[in-house]
Image: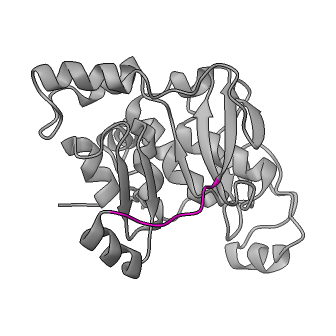
Amino acid sequence: QGISHVISPELGIALPGATLVCCDSHTSTVGGLGALAWGIGTTEGEHALATQTLVRSRPRTMRVEMNGRLPPGVTAKDMALALIGRHGATGGDGHAIEFCGEAVRGLGVEARLTLCNMAVEFGAWTGLVAPDATTVDWLRGRPHAPRGDQWDAAIAHWRSLCSDPGASYDRTLELDCATLAPQVTWGTHPGQVVGVLDPVVPDAEGAQRALDYMDVRAGQVLAGLPIDAAFIGSCTNSRLSDLRTAAAVVQGRRVAA
């Protein structure tokens, strides 16, 4: 029916507080609903199906505080890419990340799903956003969501799934989202990223090969670079809200000659 971690939230199969695994590295996507989810291999998949259990070492914890209101044209994917650009593609290595702060609370559920999807591009084990009223409103009436008295009981439980005030984390990062510009990757991994109006600044690892492959040069500003093709529909950006955003950009325009 579609990409597992896109379809399962839309159908109400993925719910806050649930534990979900799937043989896909981006399973952490459903952490945007407040679920604990991560990608596994096929051998672990067999074990999970047979026993409904898995043995896991406890991951380290990370709090990523994203403050400020997003400027127009800046999305959850830009938030994730800015974080990766600042701290590297392995900055979240081995951590379970809780995304929080004003910028995160201002996101709709689909954008939160995108943010948690990108947690694995940061090297994290998983990412999640604590459920709130936005989560409840989005799940209401979904085909597999609880109904009747079970719905009321579920909401009461979901409201308890937030970190205690003053909770300690192994690591805490902050990102000011109020000044973010749209982010563009200039290279061959997500850590090679700049704001669309900023010059390309190569990193040390494989930078020249990446520049050659992408046919860009150090110091180049990517705004205005001709676009030969655009792909819309990855598991990071394949939701109806993403298609509506793309449609708004192309409305009234024609395909290039």
**Count of all numbered marks drawn on residues in the image:** 0
> Measuring 22% from the left and 40% from the top, which residue is drawn there?
12
Residue 222 % position (x, y)? 71, 53
> Measuring 67% from the left and 30% from the top, which residue is drawn there?
66
Q: 194 or 24, which is in the foreground? A: 24
Residue 174, image quadrant: top right
Q: Viewed as shown, does residue 130 lie left or right of 90?
A: left
Q: 240 or 97, which is in the foreground? A: 97
> Measuring 67% from the left and 45% from the top, which residue is drawn there?
61
Residue 83, image quadrant: top right
Q: Determine if residue 230 is in view.
A: no
Let me know if residue 230 is in the magenta part.
no
Q: Is residue 93 above or below residue 7?
A: below
Q: Viewed as shown, does residue 230 lie left or right of 184?
A: left
Region rendered in magenta:
53-59
The colour scheme is one colour
Residue 54 % position (x, y)? 42, 66
Residue 75 % position (x, y)? 54, 36
Q: Is residue 67 above or below residue 27?
A: above
Tell me the quadrant of the picture where the N terminus can be found. Answer: bottom left
Let me know if residue 55 is in the magenta part.
yes
Q: Is residue 8 above or below residue 65?
A: below
Tell me the quadrant of the picture where the C terminus can be found. Answer: bottom left
Residue 77, image quadrant: top right
Q: Determine if residue 171 is in view.
A: yes
Q: Viewed as shown, does residue 141 lie left or right of 43?
A: left
Q: Give the main secondary structure of the magenta stretch.
A: loop
Residue 226 % position (x, y)? 60, 58
> Measuring 75% from the left and 52% from the top, which residue is drawn there?
85
